[in-house]
Amino acid sequence: MTSTRTASRTGLAALALAAALAVAGSANAQPRTMLNVGMAAQDISRLDPHYSTTTIDKVVVGWMFSGLVRFRPGSISPAEIEPDLAERWESSPDGKTWTFHLRRGVQFHRNFGEVTAEDIVFSLTKAADARRSGFAADYRAFEAVEVVDPYTVRIRLKEVVPSLLGLVTNYHGGNIVSRRAVEQLGDRFLREPVGTGPFQVTEHRARQSLELAAHEGYFRGRPQIQRVSYRFIPSDASRDLAYQNGEIDLIYGRQDQSWANRMKALPNTSVMVFDPAELGLLHMNITRAPLNDIRVRQAIAHAANREELIQFHGVDVSRAGTGLLPRGYLGGIEVGAVPHNIERARQLLREAGFPNGLTIKTITTQLPSMLATMQVVQAQLRRAGITLDMEVVEHATFHAQIRQDLSPIVFYSAARFPVADTWLTQMFHSRSIVKTPTAVTNFSHCGMADAEIDAARVETNPQRQLELWATAQRKLAEAVCAVPLREGLQIWARRNSVELGYQLNGAMSLGPLLTEQTRFR
């Protein structure tokens, strides 16, 4: 029979052994290298960066591609653009010829080889081709993109553009793709893209996740995060619960104060609010009845209540739209947004022949922050007798349908390179009207400011250029092509164990950039 003292000694020995094993296990534990990200989406749309326009796609595209130059991580300031695939560049005195000298040895994902001047020429030519890009209008000033030698590229312009570097940065059409991969993969490239960034696609699980792995040959160094699971969780409640349960480390948030406050209250959590602000405009198709009557457009503008929208979403995460461009853009002005006035809205409807109000069918995205805005606007317009009959669709479907001109009113929330030319050209130039060969995002069908937009693009006198941009905005505002609603800042949350590797003030990809320095503490 075993004595009590022997049993005690045996128990103590077992506890000591367990403690020793625990210490040894802790000492030998490997640092975490798998990052789980929760996105408000049912699935990705298109990962070819020259087509990626949705927030869902742009976030992950930012982890996979590089440009000739790039915004410094954490910044969206044009003053902080720095070398990326090009290590240096120079321009001619007249600003119409630019020469870029490439880094040597930069490798594409999945063994698609070294980046050469041919890939740069192919990428920028593709970006400028409306049949192969959603951003072709941005590159209309390009006369030629030429191979000088395997590591040198020359860009010749028909006319000076306000910011050439903005067109070759790691954003939209400036992202560089592998020529061999595009030609070899064909349509598969939309879901199996090949870039040079720190992370590469390994698997697409439809309506579940996009799986990525570190690009071991990344030219800035091997990423410290080895795997990323970009999970599609459209339900806000489900996404928040997954974060609270420890299933995800980085989460896309709702652009409202309550979400920010709730996340701030969670332990070991940091809420990140950053630029660019996405200006939400209510675009109105001026060619379709009843919106072809300016009095109806004015009535809608008077019925909208910006201050109510800001209070609804929260002062920390949004601000009132005061112009047709987001605040802070070079050349942007305040155009004196139409004041909220329900009685004036009703009077205008009566004058337009709608004494009993009217109903307008619209298509709206289910993306939480945008849907919430439209639901508030719907309630505001109803007070003036305007009923928005909203069809709510998945975000990728929304983008496809509004580009087919299927919705006479389009609430479109976006950010662009922060220069007036880019925004005005894409949103309000007649060349960008949807369903045209050079379509971009002109949903209003407005073109009354084309002359000023075109003249400003080639104007060499900075003051005169600003004046032209201002005149363009005033013309568009007088025609009530769109109603500025609110600017929504980007909002995400992360566990404090996740170290981004830089100070996050802004991200043109609309989500925290994952770099080779991102890691777990």
Image (cartoon, rainbow, N blue to C red):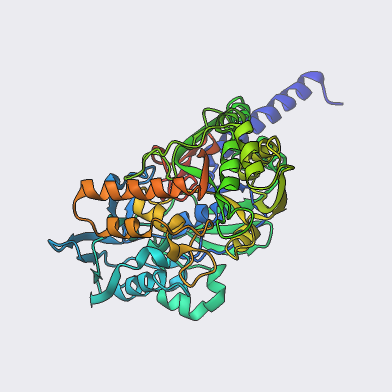
**Residue 444 x, y percent position in the rendering:** 53, 56
For image coordinates 68% across by 62% down, the residue present is 206
Determine the residue located farthest toward the bottom in the rendered image. 184
Which quadrant holds residue 243? top right
Which quadrant holds residue 235? top right
**Residue 177 x, y percent position in the rendering:** 42, 69
Tell which of 499 and 382 is nearer to you.
382
Asked whether residue 380 appears in the rendered view, the answer is: yes
Up/down of 120 relative to 360, above or below: below
Asked whether residue 419 appears in the rendered view, the answer is: no
The reply, left or right, for residue 218 in relation to residue 397 is: left
For image coordinates 69% across by 28% down, the residue present is 15
Determine the residue located farthest toward the right in the rendered image. 1
Up/down of 308 relative to 82, above or below: above
**Residue 88 x, y percent position in the rendering:** 21, 59
**Residue 388 x, y percent position in the rendering:** 70, 47
The reply, left or right, for residue 72 in relation to residue 18 is: left
The reply, left or right, for residue 166 in relation to residue 197 is: left
Report the quarter where the N terminus lies. Answer: top right
Tell which of 6 and 512 is nearer to you.
512
Label tally: 0
Determine the residue located farthest toward the top in the rendered image. 5
